[in-house]
Structure formats: structure tokens, C-alpha cells
Image: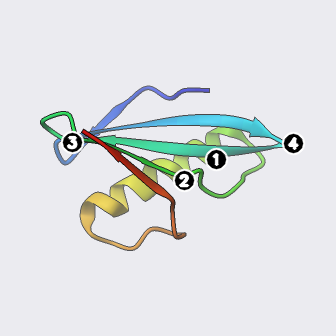
Amino acid sequence: MDSTPIEYRGCELSVIVRHVSGQFVATLLIERPGGVRRAIGPLRAFPTAQAAANFAIECGKAELDGRSPGREPRVAVSG
């Protein structure tokens, strides 16, 4: 499941959710102005795809707000 991208603080947040071993895990994509992209995740597992996507979006908002996300994510950067 791929989510519809949302805009937050001038950045685009989108989520890729995968079904793994009966649970759903999400990877968050953050695209900043100028095309710099980051992938954060995979994040923790949830029983539904929507719960995984919602958690990922909230982690992205926390990242952009300078708050600590709910878990230490793995981060990849491209540009």
C-alpha cells in the first residue's frame, strides 16, 4: 500500500506500507524543497496498514518539527 503524499511544512511526506509476517510495516519518504529525499524506516510493525501509515506520517511530522520520533529510525539520504 502506498499512501497519497501529504504536504507538511513545505515538504512532501509519503508512505510505503508492506505486509510482512502477518503485520504491516511502513517506510516514510520525506522530500524537501530542492529534491533532497530521505527514507526513514522501516518503522515498527502494526496490525493494520492504516495504523502503520498513520504512525509513519506522525514520525515525519515530528522529524520536521524537531521533536523526537517514537522510535530510532533507520535513515537513507539521496539528493
Residue 31 picture quarter:
top left
Assign a secondary structure to mark 1. Answer: helix
User: Would you call the spot at circle 1 few (<14 residues within 10 Å), some (14-19), or many (20 or more)?
Assistant: some
Nearest the viewer among 74 and 53 is 74
Residue 37 picture quarter:
top left
Nearest the viewer among 78 and 12 is 78
**Mark nearer the N terminus (3 vs 4):** 4
Kindly identify which residue carries mark 4: 22
Residue 48 picture quarter:
top right
- The location of residue 40, given as percent across then percent down, is 46, 51
Residue type, label 4 = Gly
Cβ atoms at labels 1 and 2 below 8 Å apart: yes
User: Would you call the spot at circle 4 few (<14 residues within 10 Å), some (14-19), or many (20 or more)?
Assistant: few
Q: Is 1 on the left-hand or right-hand side of 31?
A: right
Q: Is 49 on the left-hand or right-hand side of 9?
A: right
Q: Residue at x 67, y 46 (%)?
A: 25
Kindly identify which residue carries mark 2: 55
Mark seen at residue 32: 3
Residue type, label 2 = Phe
Residue type, label 3 = Arg
Mark seen at residue 20: none
- Dot in front, 1 or 3: 3
Q: Residue at x 52, y 70 (%)?
A: 72
- Dot in front, 2 or 3: 3
Distance in Å between CA atoms under marks 2 and 3: 20 Å
- The location of residue 29, given as percent across then percent down, is 41, 41
